[in-house]
Every structure is written in C-alpha cells, then in structure tokens.
Amino acid sequence: MSTARTARRMTLLDPESCYRAVKSRDRRFDGVFYTAVRSTGIYCRPSCPARTPALTGVTFHPTAAAAQAAGYRACKRCLPDATPGSPDWDVAADVAGRAMRLISDGLVDREGVEGLARRVGYTPRHLGRLLVQELGAGPLALARARRAQTARVLVETTDMPLSDVAFAAGFSSIRQFNETVREVYALSPTDLRGRRTRSTARGTVSLRLAVRTPFAGRRMLDFLAHHLVPGVEVAGPGWYARTLDLPHGPGTVRLELADAASVGETAFVPAEFSLHDLRDTAAAVERVRRLLDADCDPVAVDDHLADDAVLGHLVRATPGLRVPGQVDGDETAVRTVVGQQVSVTGARTVTGRIVVAHGRRVETDVPGLTHLFPDAVTLARVDPESLPMPCARGRALVGLAGALAAGTVALDRGPDRDDVRRALLDLPGIGPWTADYVAMRALGHPDVFLPTDLAVRGVLRGLAGDTGEPADPERWSPWRSYALMHLWNTLMPDTPAPPPSSTSRRPQKES
C-alpha cells in the first residue's frame, strides 16, 4: 500500500474500499480513516471487534475530529482516538500535513487559529477551507478532538481535580470541558475517572504511545543511546530518557523500547512523563511520538525497499526500522552543526560541554538528567571563539542560532520543507549534508539521501561488492530516509539488553 495510493483513498474515502478494510478488521487502516455507524451514533477504528454493520448504515471520515463534527461519539470498546496517527499526514509536506503536526503539538491552544495560519503561511479563512476539504474538519474542531483525548488521559491516569484537568487539557472553561467529554465519549468526566485502573502522582503521567508494527524498538534505542548528549539524555538496558523543554516549563520522559514484530497491528511504547505543568501533556506526547516516528507506515516502507537487490536483505533482517525524529527542531539543527566532520563520540563530548556551559539546569527524578538543551536565543549571544570547536564551525553554530531565534529559519514542521532547506543553505557554514540531515530528522522528510556521507559510501561499496549489483538510491524513493537508516544500522553498536524477566512496571493507558 503506497503512501500516494493511501493519500488518495483518504481524500476520496471510497466507501467500498473502506468497507472491505472494515469487514476484514484490517489493523493497518487504524488511524487512516474512521467508520461511523448511523444507527448507534458511534465512530470506530476499522479493526473494531464489534459486529460489522451494513455498508448502507455507515459513513467514513478521514479524522476523528471529522467524525465528531458530524455528531458521532467515540466507541468505548475500540477507543478510536487511541490509534496511531495517519502515516500520510505524518509525512505529507502539504498544508494539511503541516497543520496537523502543529495542531497535535497544541499550537491552536497556545496561539489560536491565527497563530496556526501564520506558521503555515495562509490566512485563517483559507486555511480553514483547506483543512475542511482535506480532513473533514476545521482547525478548531481538530484541536478540540486533541483536547478531548488529552483530557481522557489525564482523567484516567492522574488524581488531579477535574477542574484542573479541564485547564491542563487546554479547555477555556469547565463547562466546555464537561460538554466536550460527554459529547465525545458519552460519559461524564466523573464516569471516566471511575473506569481507570490506576493513579499516579501529580505532575506524572504514565501512558502507552501507539506505534504501527513492525517496530524495531531495539534499534531505535541503539541509535538514541549512541548519539545521546550527557545531561540531556540517558539510556540503559531497554530504556531511554531525556529532558524536555516545553511551552509551559521543563519535563522529562522515560521510554521502554522493545521490538514488536507483528505486521499491521498496533504496538505500544510505555512512557512516563514528569511535567512541571500538566498543560504540556499534549505537546510532550506529540514530540515524543515524533522522536519515535510512531506514525510511520512500516509495511509500505518495507514492501518498497525489500525488493531491492542491494538493500533488500538489510530490510528483511530489520523490519520496521524507523527514522529517529526529534523533540525540538532547533536542538537537532544545533547538534547537527556540532557533529559536522567529527566522530559521533567527539560530537557527544563537545555538545555535552555546550550543555553544561549554556543549558538551563533542572531538577529531575532521573539520575543523569540535569539540563535542558540550550535554546537558540541563548546560543545566538555566545561568543563563537568560546565554543569548544573550530572557529568556523563556532561561527556557523552561532549564525544558525541567530536565524532560529529571529524566525528566519523555523524548524517546527510548519513551513514548507523546501523553503526551510533554502533558508538553511543561505547561512554561512551550512552545506547540503547539514541541511538534508536536518530535513530528515527535524522536519520528518521521508525521502532524504546523503550521497556524500563517508559512512554511507563505505557501506554501499561493501554491499555492491557482496551482491555484484550497483546501488541506485533513486530506486529507493520516496523512502530514501529509511534506506539511509538501514545503511547506518549496519554500523550501529548494540545497547545492553534488558533482563529476561523485565516487564512494564505498571499498567498504562493508551495514547
């Protein structure tokens, strides 16, 4: 199932194609579209185990928000709002895809529809028309659906007073909170709280992040552990943790990463968030999902790459390999400049020194997490001569930080990717390798290849010698970023495996 074909189906929502997926309860379409049943007033994910209704009795919607706007409420059995996001909106570079990523980050709650429109470069009215056409709902309805999901997580997983939950989830009033929860879930907030299985301390949210399978969680951990920055990130057998610089204050997240091999289903990554301000719950979850590349469609990627004569055996050996994303685009860009023309170990050492000198110190419950990564405004004021790197690279880093602080370059996934690349290349000391790496990691570009990367060139020479076939990266499009990860994956050291008896420490809710 290619992304292009899926995107067209999502736009057109051909009833017969959608109904075939519903009849087969195909989990690969969970999050791609939603099924609404007229007789019950409920919307479900395609794999819902309930009895399949007749085709004449259902409608199909591209988003949960569209189903809610049409007057349907979420199924209590399959919890359709707990599915991974659509892989098409995750990789799409069009306006709808860019807007969806910003809405998921909570931008509408913080800056309103005007702020969202400004980030994507459209007027609020025109943006609203585009989103209704592509997603079946406008920006306010999409943001409302996200608030409802955040509210459910907070109600079911914390002991916060419900009045605090309302404002933490982004609602402007308790009345709006009560009405939305009743409309979406057909339950009052008090009833939702009665359904929970556990509670957590104030400021701590434990949940499970939905990801599509197969999911090469161990290799994701290996990549993150190999590149971690002291003070900002730590890792151990089976887990990874880091600090988060969020809109309302600092936070941390601890993830348990393991492989999930079943094809076309949904797996869950246990995550524990500790937040200074629970209003940042939605933003923290979305940013960690970006880090995990959780909404990727691994079946489509692997099907495309597995047939290649040079790359195929690597893909078959590690199904579900993801492109690690980021929790902060500015941080990723700065780390990329620091890592130019030095080893990974050297880059970690230098970046750690910059963190100690210019990062904000924070108190956390996770040993080793001591600092937030320095923000662009702080780094823009640093004397390049004082940085622990060659002067030319120091000037490039400070120049980049200045552009990020001024908004000349924006890495929040709102602007067009090509525009961002051109803006990066206009900066002194930023070349194609850096701009493309940033596009892959910070902007989630699925089709980036780095032909000048020395490690990649070495791996390709070895593979060509083994197979007798010349490598042609053009054949790997539109998933060249994933092909690149498979090449790097051959060089990635393993992290220690968790003890055989290790399991998730407590039951958790889905998100």
Image (spheres, rainbow, N blue to C red):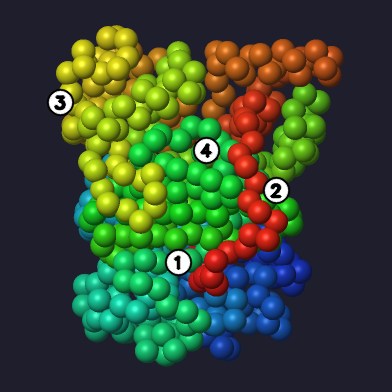
The secondary element bearing badge 4 is classed as helix
* Residue underneath mark 2: 299
Q: Amino acid at mark 4?
A: Ala
Mark 2 to mark 1 CA distance (whole Å): 28 Å
The mark closer to the camera, 4 or 3, is 4
Location of mark 3 (residue) = 381
Give x and y (percent) for residue 82: 52, 68
**Snapshot quadrant of residue 283:** bottom left
Query: Where residue 288 sits: x, y (%)?
Result: 44, 51
Residue beneath the point at 38% across and 75% down: 158
Mark 2 and mark 4 in contact? Answer it, CB < 8 Å: no
Closer to us: 365 or 191: 365
Q: CA distance from mark 2 to mark 4?
A: 26 Å
**Mark positioned earlier in the residue sequence (2 or 1):** 1
Q: Are marks 2 and 1 in contact (CB under 8 Å)?
A: no
Q: Is residue 126 visible?
A: no
The residue beneath circle 4 is: 225
Label 3 sits on what residue type? Arg
The numbered mark, 4 or 3, whose residue comes first in the sequence reads 4
Q: Nearer the viewer, mark 2 or mark 1?
A: 1
Can you tell which of label 2 and label 4 is closer to the viewer? 4
- What residue is pinned by disc 1? 206
Question: In this rendering, is residue 369 above or below 407?
Answer: below
Q: What amino acid type should be assigned to the residue bearing mark 1?
A: Ser
Relative to the observer, which residue lies in front, 289 or 34?
289
